[in-house]
Image: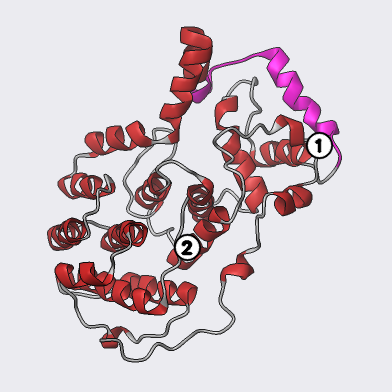
Amino acid sequence: MELKIPSPEQTYWGLRAMKTVALADGTLDDTELHLLASVQQIFGTTHAPEQLPPIMPADLAREFPDPQLRQQLVQGLIVMSLIDGKANVQETDLVEQFAQALEGSAPEVKDLRHVLKGEILRLRLDLARRFWLREKFIGIWNSEGIRGIYKLVRGLMGKYENAELAARYQALEQYPAGSLGRAYWEYCRENGFALPGEKGGAPEQILFHDCAHLLSGYGTAPEEEVQVACFSAGFQRRDPFTFILFVLLQFHVGVRMTPITEARTGFFDPEKAMIAIRRGAAMNVDLNNGWDYWPVMGDQVEELRRRYNILPSESFRPAHRRVVGNVS
């Protein structure tokens, strides 16, 4: 994920836009205040919320000429509109106005409208069209045809069994302690997950997600699933915000986006999410695009973290927060 860090002045303008969206429904609640505080914690500014005046979309556009920062800000405004756990007309309308002024083409703006109108099937289909799984299907179809698609679908349903494949993964138990292979075997056994090839096991094509858990150090509790998705958004090179929107809806807003996991509410922590995104963006490899885990299964997890530039969360918490003076 290409991630640009805004200057203190740009952060100030962005915070004003986020507060303007938050206040569109007439209230600034605790979750919205927490999001504003989290943005400042990550980017090192210290504006009191009451010192952030509203801003019109056209005025914001003049202060944000950079296309990448514009896109990031529109995505941040989408998060702000949903951070209180629901979509409403006033905030959705204002997000659309900001996106138009910033000449944003983020498809997630349309998804926000689907959430507002309760068009969950259309929302799921739109996200599925852009999600990484679509690329997996295309790749498998091109290499293995209908037989490969059948195996993938059966695997996603937990109904594909292959004794030879299962034996290969079961052998990871014998890998050295601390290696990626042994860590993956332990991760599956400790969490009650079947290995690929075993009954109920996931298809190999989504094993990168489990490796992201292991390499990032995030667990499998709902809050950590949010963080590993944000971490994955960071290292992804194609449509990374889809990961973030997916878990925001699934684990925070309570919109069920997948048939295999119950929807939850209140598990999106903005500060932890932004740190996870920055950790993933700092990596020098995309685990979901051209990365083969088998050649490194015998390598130590700590060594892979160094090799892939996976930095600890503390690296992205500023030691000193800057106070930005009056910006006009």
Q: Is residue 77 left or right of residue 324?
A: left
Residue 112 is left or right of residue 281, and the answer is: left
Query: Which of 205/66 is in front?
Result: 66
Q: Is residue 208 above or below residue 52?
A: above
**Measured from the top left, where is residue 212 in percent x and y?**
60, 45
Task: Identify the residue at image location x=20%, y=60%.
Answer: 95
- From the viewer's side, name the closer residue of 138 and 37: 138
Residue 201 visible to an observer of this rendering: no
Screen quadrant of the C terminus: bottom left
Q: Nearer the viewer, residue 96 or 253?
A: 96
Q: What secondary structure is the stretch in magenta mostly built from?
A: helix
Q: Please, is residue 203 above or below residue 184 in the view?
A: above
- Mark 1 belongs to which amino acid? Gly
Identify the residue under disc 2: 274
- The residue that appears at 28% across and 67% down in the rendered structure is 64
Q: Is residue 74 magenta?
A: no
Quarter residue 85 falls in: bottom left
**How far apart, in angstroms, are the residues tagged by discs 2 and 1?**
31 Å
Disc assigned to residue 298:
1
**Residue 69 position in % (x across, y down):** 35, 62
Q: Is residue 169 magenta?
A: yes
Place of residue 37 in the rendered image (x, y in percent of width and height, measured from the top left): 40, 77
Q: Position of residue 171 (x, y in %)?
A: 80, 26
* Mark 1 Cα shell of 10 Å, populated few (<14), some (14-19), many (≥20): some
Q: How is the image coloured?
A: secondary structure
Secondary structure of residue under mark 1: loop
Q: Which residues are magenta?
A: 155-176
Q: Classify mark 2: helix, strand or loop.
A: helix
Marks 2 and 1, the one that precedes in the sequence: 2
Residue type, label 2: Met
- With 71 as the anchor, is 280 left or right in this view? right
Q: Residue at x 69, y 17 (%)?
A: 165
